[in-house]
Image (spheres, helix red, strand yellow):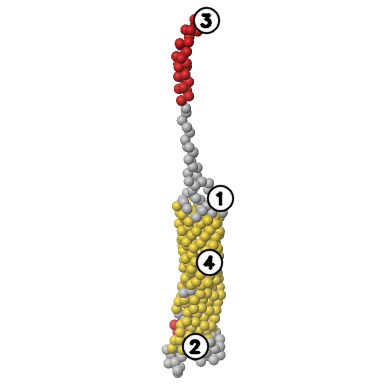
Amino acid sequence: MRKNARLLTPLAPAVASVLAGPMAFAADFSYPASPPVLTAPAVFSWTGFYAGLNVGYVWGNDPVSAYAPNLSQWGAGSTAPFEAAIVSTGSMHPSGVIGGGQIGYNFQIDHYVLGLEGDVEGLDASSTRDSGYLTGFTTHFRPRKLIHDVDEVSYQPFATIRGRIGYAFDRVLIYATGGLAVTGQDFSRSLDWTYIDAPCPYGADGFHACHAGSISRTLAGWAIGGGIEYALTNNWTIRAEYLHADFGTTNFSTFNPGTSHPGQQLIHTIGGTTFDIARVGINYKFDLGGLAPAVIKY
């Protein structure tokens, strides 16, 4: 035994070295580490309901005119209807501040955004046109007669229901919009002269106010425009927008109360009424129906 032990003792280091080699190799061997999971940046979605406020400025155009459809009722040789038409023709340009609120819904498909929006606005737009005093051109009266016209128009309120279509560059949306527009119009005309129409009431200038009247009505037309909107956060967006609205032509009549001929009628035309609106706004987008951020895994 002792002899064998003495023989094995010199071999121990060599055996240990041989056995340690595979173990060391196994300890050094390891599998490649898993690659990290990469998450793409969140892509903003315009899909969802929103509501907000806006403020801006409106400037309009209102051509006005008058004509007499029944000339034979004015008396032989009377130039009154012609002079009334001349003095009552011109343009008004109502302008003022507009502001209110809007509500809508957007649905995004890839980069394209489809939506529907409605808004109701307070509108402070009005204009007055004073013709000044026109010297009558007939020679039947001495001294020459004068004729004078004052028109006033105002609008309140303003509302639209419009479709929207746009293209989104992530948080930037460029869009076109168009649809129905509605507004309330108040128009008045005071046409008076120095004709011998004593039964007519006197106007503020002492003339006979023989053709004075007013009308209030709701006008329906169309609006078209476009804008740009930017998402400050996932919920708050700001926008700048331009609209052009057209309400067509309206008419109303006035009569001379100092005559027995009801045919002495003037038809007054306001048209076509147009608005141009520039405004800015802010919206809050609700987190309903939004798209989740894209996630890419490797």
Q: Secondary structure at mark 3?
A: loop
Instruction: Tell me the CA gap for discs 4 and 2.
Output: 41 Å
Q: CA distance from mark 1 to mark 2?
A: 66 Å
Identified at 48% across, 83% down, the residue is 149
Task: Mark 3 and mark 4 in contact? Answer it, CB < 8 Å.
Answer: no
Q: Amino acid at mark 4?
A: Gly
Give the x, y percent position of residue 295: 50, 42
Distance from the alpha carbon under mark 3 to that under mark 1: 87 Å
Residue, disc 3: 1
3 vs 2, front mark: 3
Alpha carbons under labels 4 and 1: distance apart: 29 Å
Nearer to us of marks 3 and 4 is: 3
Under tag 2, what secondary structure? Answer: strand
The residue tagged 4 is 99
Name the residue carrying label 1: 289
Disc 4 crowd, CA 10 A, few/some/many (<14, 14-19, 20+): many
**Whether residue 268 can be seen here:** no
- First in sequence, mark 4 or 1: give its number: 4
107, 240: nearer the viewer: 240
Q: Is residue 11 above or below residue 191?
A: above
Residue 4: % across, % down: 49, 6
Looking at the rendered structure, the kind of residue marked 3 is: Met
Q: Disc 3 to disc 2, how far (Cα)? A: 151 Å
Amino acid type indicated by mark 2 = Trp
